[in-house]
Structure formats: structure tokens, C-alpha cells
Amino acid sequence: QKVGQPKEAMKTLLEFISNKRNTRTWTSSHEALMMALMTLTVELKDAPAAKDALYHYRIMTMASVPGSLENVVLHLVDMVESRCEAQRELVGDSATLDEVEDLEQDRGP
């Protein structure tokens, strides 16, 4: 991330979390990696990557440290809420849901 390649950083972290060999036993560094990964997924707007990482992390932490999963999910929610609030401030109060154009309006089944 610091070298200017957030997509590559996200891909590498996701591969690490997804690898069963690296996730047999939980360590506190796994939580730090997940926090960084969740930050990258929010910045890159990659919800499927976040979902995949959370799935693998849940399997790793389910029996031993469920509180760590909770910390990661709360971090993700806080990041998303702050990003939404920042976007809301940029748009201002001028755009309400009724005024927003339906982006899928021209697409039909």
C-alpha cells in the first residue's frame, strides 16, 4: 500500500488469508493483516474481496477467538460508514433518494 500498489497489496493479503497453510492457528498478526485488508477493500470498493476474506477469517477464528472476527467486522463497518459520510458531505443535501437517477433504468431483463 505504501509503495503505491494497493491492488497488489490487497491481492497478496487475500491470498495469504485464503491459504489454509497460513491459517491453521490464529495469531494476533492475523487480525492486523485483516484490518489492513479491510481498509484496502473499502478504498478499492471491492466488496467481493472483503466477503471472501471475512469468510476465511471466520473459519480461522470461529472456535478460538470469535472476538477477533468481531473487531475486524466493526472496523469494516466503521470504515464504510465514515466513507459514506464523507461522500454525503461532498454531495451535500441537494441530492435526495428521490432525485437520484436509477442507473439500471435502461437495462431490461
Image: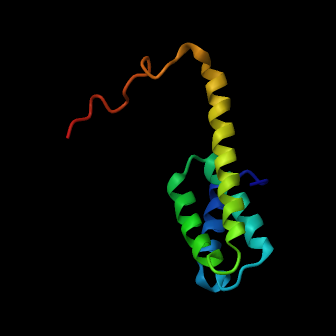
Location of the N terminus by quadrant is bottom right
Q: Is there any visible trace of residue 5 in the rendered image?
A: no
User: Eyeballing the image, is 83 above or below 70?
Assistant: above
Task: Please give the name of the residue rendered at 62% of the width and 55% of the height, measured from the top-left corner.
Answer: 7
Task: Please give the name of the residue rendered at 69% of the width and 80% of the height, measured from the top-left corner.
Answer: 64
Q: Nearer the viewer, residue 61 or 23?
A: 61
Task: Please give the name of the residue rendered at 70% of the width and 53% of the height, measured from the top-left corner.
Answer: 75
Q: Is there any visible trace of residue 61 in the rendered image?
A: yes
Q: Position of residue 34 (x, y in %)?
A: 69, 64
Q: Position of residue 105 (x, y in %)?
A: 30, 28
Location of the C terminus by quadrant is top left
Instruction: Answer left or right for 92 relative to 29.
Output: left
Task: Please give the name of the residue rendered at 53% of the width and 60% of the height, measured from the top-left corner.
Answer: 51
User: In which image quadrant can residue 107 be found?
Assistant: top left
User: Eyeballing the image, is 74 above or below 18?
Assistant: above
Q: Position of residue 30 (x, y in %)?
A: 73, 72
Q: Position of residue 32 (x, y in %)?
A: 77, 65
User: In which image quadrant can residue 88 be found?
Assistant: top right
User: In which image quadrant can residue 20 be found?
Assistant: bottom right
User: Eyeballing the image, is 76 above or below 90?
Assistant: below
